[in-house]
Image: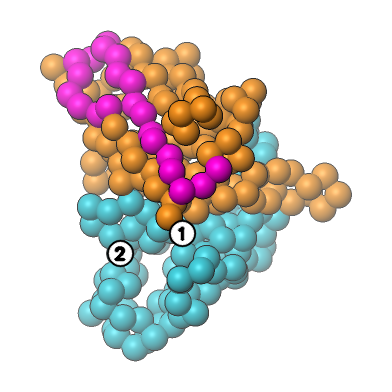
């Protein structure tokens, strides 16, 4: 089955840039989506199709995807960005299965 | 405003059954694929099952095949998850989620596209324990 690997944690100072990676075999051939989840809340879509942002999501959130790694970048990090972040793809080779990454806890110092 | 409201969670003994419901509003329910996604306590997200707009296609994660059944009633704008033979490892918050765009494989490019979840319910907790 397809596996998406994320670093367990990323720490960043306010105003700096956080980069969260999502590794998967030839992930560059798949659309990657990113979700933000704060404690006790449902996930929120922050980037879809590698680099598009839903309405209402700040431009500080951006994404890229190539080769075996996709990246979510949060610029000018704010305290409110502290959350868990998950990448996700649809794997056509495994019975139409949706796969989530292992998740990354972003801590704002 | 799009709203997804889950219900039906609770405490159930191993081997028992539970039926989850998700009431949808604020959009044309019959036009979207819908999914159930779960999250065990302190763990990550796991996709459980999804269903096509007209209910003609259903897919499941391997761990629930033969035990869980996803269904929908477009006249009632509702999504369901019938869970049988429940196990301790099924303990989780279960979310109902709308697929923003259908996932598909582009045979010309070899790319797997789409498949994001743009709206989620608040979740309902299922606890399997004796």
Q: Using residue A3 as the reference point, say whether residue B40 is left or right of it.
A: left
Tell me the distance, in whole angstroms, between the alpha carbons under discs 1 and 2: 13 Å
Task: Pinpoint residue A72: horizontal percent, then vertical percent.
Answer: 49, 69
Q: Quadrant of the C terminus of chain B?
A: top left
Residue A76, by quadrant, is bottom left
Tell me the orange chain: B
Q: Residue at x 52, y 65 (%)?
A: A54
Q: Secondary structure at mark 1?
A: strand
Q: Residue at x 28, y 70 (%)?
A: A82
Where residue B118 appears, as percent x and y from the top left, is 49, 53
Chain displayed in cyan: A
Residue B61 visible to an observer of this rendering: no
Residue tagged 2: A83
Residue identified by numbered label 1? A45
Question: Considering the image in quadrants, where does the N terminus of chain B appear?
Answer: bottom left
Question: Quick one: SS at disc 2?
Answer: strand
Q: Earlier in the sequence, mark 1 or mark 2?
A: 1
Q: Which residues are magenta?
A: B8-28
């Amino acid at each position: 089955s397809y596996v998406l690997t994320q670093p367990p944690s990323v720490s960043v100072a306010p105003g700096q840039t956080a980069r969260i990676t999502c590794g998967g075999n030839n992930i560059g051939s798949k659309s990657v989506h990113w979700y933000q989840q704060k404690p006790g809340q449902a996930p929120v879509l922050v980037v879809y199709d590698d680099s598009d942002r839903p309405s209402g999501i700040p431009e500080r959130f951006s994404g890229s995807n190539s080769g075996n790694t996709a990246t979510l970048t949060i610029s000018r990090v704010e305290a409110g960005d502290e959350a868990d972040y998950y990448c996700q793809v649809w794997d056509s080779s495994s019975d139409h299965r949706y796969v989530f990454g292992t998740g990354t806890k972003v801590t704002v110092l | 405003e799009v709203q997804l409201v889950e219900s039906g969670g609770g405490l159930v003994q191993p081997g028992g059954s539970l039926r989850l419901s998700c009431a949808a509003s604020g959009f044309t329910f019959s036009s979207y694929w819908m999914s159930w996604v779960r999250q065990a306590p302190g763990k990550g997200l796991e996709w459980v099952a999804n269903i096509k707009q007209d209910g003609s296609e259903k897919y499941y994660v391997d761990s629930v095949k033969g035990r869980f059944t996803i269904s929908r009633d477009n006249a009632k704008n509702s999504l369901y998850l019938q869970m049988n033979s429940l196990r301790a490892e099924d303990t989780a918050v279960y979310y109902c989620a709308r697929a923003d765009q259908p996932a598909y494989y582009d045979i010309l490019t070899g790319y797997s596209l789409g498949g994001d979840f743009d709206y989620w319910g608040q979740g309902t907790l299922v606890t399997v324990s004796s």
